[in-house]
Amino acid sequence: MLWKTHALAGASLGVFLSNHLDTASPMPSLVGITVEPYVILTIGAMAGALGSLLPDIDQPNSKVGSKFFMLPTLLKVTIGHRGPTHSIVGAVTVSFLVWLLLSMIYPLTNMALYVLLLAGYISHLVLDSLNPQGVAWLWPVTSKKFRIPMFDTGGVGESLIVIPSLVVLLILVMVL
Ligand SMILES: [Zn+2]
C-alpha cells in the first residue's frame, strides 16, 4: 500500500484510541501532563501515523526510509523488504525502540504513546496483507506470507476504494 494509505489508517486508529486511552487509561494523558482534548487527538493522529509508516523503514525510497541515512538500504540488503519488519515481533520491537527514543527526547512520554505507535504499526501490516505480496506475520516462526489479495499497491482499488474509505473513517473518528 502507499504511504498515504498507511498514514490515513494509522491516524484514524490513533485518534480513535487516544479518545479512549485518555479516559480509560490510568495515566492522566498521553504526554504525562493534562492537556486540551484536541492536543491529545493531534498527538494520537501523529503517533498512529508515525507507527503506520515505520514498517517500511526497510525500503530506502519509502516515506520513513528516505529520512534515515543508510539504515534502510542496509535493512533491505540484509533482511529484505516485507521481512522481519512486517511481523508481530517486528511491530513490538520497532515500536518500542522508537518509543524509547521519543521518551529520551521527551521524558514525560508514557506507555500510552507506545500503544498508539504499535497500533499504527499493526494497521500497516493489516493493510499490506491485502496486497498480493502478503505479510510474514509470524516471522521468525515461519516466513510464510499471509495475504487476502484484494488491492495492488497504488492500483485503482487503492485510489478509488481504500483511500476514500479511510478519509471518511478519519473524519468519523474525529467528529464522533
Ligand atoms: Zn509495508
Image (spheres, rainbow, N blue to C red):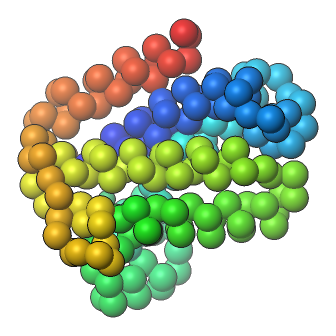
Task: Report which quarter residue 14 is drawn in.
Answer: top right
Q: How many marks?
A: 0
Q: Residue at x 60, y 47 (%)?
A: 115
Q: Which of 59 and 18 lies nearest the eye of the viewer? A: 18
The percent position of residue 104, horizontal first and vertical second, equals 81, 67
Location of residue 92 in the rendering, given as x and y in whole percent from the top left corner: 51, 63
**Residue at the top extreme of this rendering:** 176
Q: Quadrant of ligand 1?
A: bottom left
Residue 89: x and y, percent? 43, 68
Asked whether the viewer can see residue 2, the reply is: no
Vertical order, 60 against 148 (above or below)? below
Q: Quadrant of the C terminus?
A: top right
* Looking at the image, residue 84 lies above or below residue 28: below
Residue at figure coordinates x 64%, y 25% from the top left? 20
Q: Tell me residue 100's x, y (percent).
A: 71, 66
Q: Is residue 91 left or right of residue 149?
A: right
- Residue drawn at x 50%, y 45% is 119
- Picture quadrant of residue 4: top left
The residue drawn where x is 37% and y is 50% is 124
**87 or 72: nearer the viewer:** 87
